[in-house]
Each structure stands twice: as C-alpha cells, then as structure tokens.
Amino acid sequence: LLASVAIVTLTAGGAFAQTVGFSQIGSESGWRAAETTVTRQQAEERGYDLRFSDAQQRQENQIAALRSFIAQDVDAILIAPVVATGWDAVLREAQEAEIPVVLLDRQVDSSDDLYLTAVGSDLVHEGAVAGEWLVTAVDGKECRVVELQGTTGSSPAIDRKTGFEQAIASHSNVSIVRSQTGDFTRSGGKTVMESFLQAEGGGANICAVYAHNDDMALGAIQAIREAGLKPGTDILVVSIDGVPDIFLALAAGEANATVELTPNMAGPAFDALKAFWDNGTVPPKFIQTESRLYTQKDNPQAEYEGRKGLGY
Ligand code: GZL
C-alpha cells in the first residue's frame, strides 16, 4: 500500500509538464480579461502549471513578478508588457537564468535577442484599417475626429495612432482635432469623451470618435448619449478589439466599426515554447495574429452570441 501511495504521490507531483510564469497587465478591458481566461485554458489543456500575476497596470509590479518567476526557476515566462520601455535589465536577468520569455499582445523597445518571440497583431495595420474605414464612410465630407488613445507609452497606443494617421494623411477632409489617453478603460473613455464634447460645441463639431480599444469606445458611447446625441449617427464610433459588447452596440446602431483582435495569444506562444523545449527550435521574433474589420453589416448580433462567454 505504501509503495502505491508513493507512486501516486510521485505521479501527482510530476503531473505538470512545465511551469510557466505569466505577468499580466491587469484587467483594464474586456479583451484583457478574455486573454487571461484563454491563457489559463491553454495552459490547462497542455498540463502546464501557470503561475499568474496581475500587475494592476504598473510596470514595477511586472518587473517584480518576473524576478519572482526567475527565483522560482520557472520553465518559461509570458509577459504582456504594459509599456514599451524599461525592460532591458529584467529581461537580461531572465536570459542569464536561461528562462525563455515570450511577449504577448504588446511589444518592447528592448533588443529582440532578449526574448524568445512576441505574439501579437500588427497594431499599425489595425489603426490603418480603422482610418481607412472612416475615410470611406465619410466619402469626402469634412470629418473632425476626436481620438481616445490607449495607455501612454504602450505599443498599441503608439502604433494604432500611427496607423490611423497614415490612413487619413492623404484625405484632408478627415483630421484629428483632439487626442487624449483614456488608458484603455471604459471609465477613461467616458470621462475624456465628456471633455471632448464640452470643448466641441456639445458634440456639434465632432464627426467621429476613434478609440484605440472597444472599452473606451463603449464609455464614449455612453457620454455621447448623455449629451443628448445619437452615437453611431450624430457621431461615428470606430474602435479595435471586437469584444462582445461592441457587437451589441453595432447591432443597436450605436457603434459603426471595430477591428477584431484575437484574445488567444497564449496558443501560439505555448506552441513556440514546446518546439523550443522539445527540439531547441528558435521561432521567428514575431508571430503575427490576424485581425479583421466588422461593421453593422456583419450580423453583429450573431457575432455577439458567438463571443459572449469566451471569458470577456
Ligand atoms: C492590444 C492590447 C490592448 C487591447 C486593449 O494588443 O495590448 O490592451 O487592445 C488592452 O483592450 O488594454
């Protein structure tokens, strides 16, 4: 009996194929919550022991989490870096500990020899898709745009702005007249949109709001409604992520377009890590996920039904 108990204990103790530390930014948006859910599911399916840390959107907490994972000698580290700068030292410590690091959904300014690979979308392209949609929608008419930026210094805030501006650059009828960070949150989007409305004739001078994510767009929609205007009609609403609630807003005619971002960054990350652990395969430095545009014409109610419950 004792021998069999020992065997069971050993087997149970060895049940986890690998231990992975995950430094997550926080839960600032529905998309971020979904990414966390999917990462946990992906780890579970693979039998990995996922050590999870929520940084409450503070870089110092992410750096502390990485140092803790290094001290635990985990087999790999996943990190969604809240901002693009300030990672060299801790990434070098992980490299010296021979722990592979994979970036999820955001990029860093550090040299790419300091991480195994980065899984994410082409953030500049997402901004360009949003800009191109608006240019087409206004069809030559003047359009004064207000912009709700993501977290200051984050790669999505920088790149989505760049892409949108590139797309509207050759259309002088479309221009960004105000731009401010709403920190990727609904409350941030609502508060900043309220200030834009006040500054722009109660909204009479605003043709469209471009939000770097759906959560800020949903906050802006609320502010537009409370100002007595019709979101999606008086003021066009274009954003990025494809969270379930933006599909409800599309179905209600209160939003006009979103660029979908998959929350499944962990799947490709774990696949790359398995090849690296098993065969030493070095993946490309960027594993790109696809994104696509959805508008009111794309059966948003059905898209909502298909997405709710995916952990958003
Ligand atoms: C983009 C990702 C962004 C999402 C936001 O890749 O980093 O962070 O678009 C989230 O919803 O806050």
Image: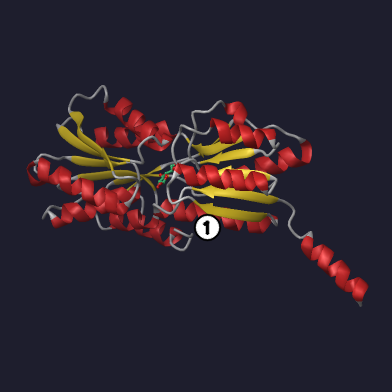
Residue at image x 17%, y 52%?
224
Where is the C terminus found, in terms of image quarters?
A: bottom left
Left or right: where does residue 277 sit relative to residue 253? right
Q: Which amino acid does label 1 sit on?
A: Thr
Whether residue 294 is situated above or below residue 136 in the rendered picture: below
Picture quadrant where residue 211 is located: top left
Q: Residues within 10 Å of mark 1 (few under 14, many from 20)?
A: some
Residue 255 makes an appearance in the image? no
Image coloring type: secondary structure
Q: Name the residue under label 1.
A: 37
As displayed, is residue 185 above or below residue 279? Answer: below
Q: Residue at x 23, y 25 (%)?
A: 171
Q: Specify whether residue 152 is in view.
A: yes
| Residue found at x 8% / y 43% | 204
The percent position of residue 212, horizontal first and vertical second, equals: 34, 41
Looking at the image, in which quadrant does ligand 1 appear? top left
Q: Which residue lies furthest to the top in this view?
A: 170
271 versus 8 height, above or below: above
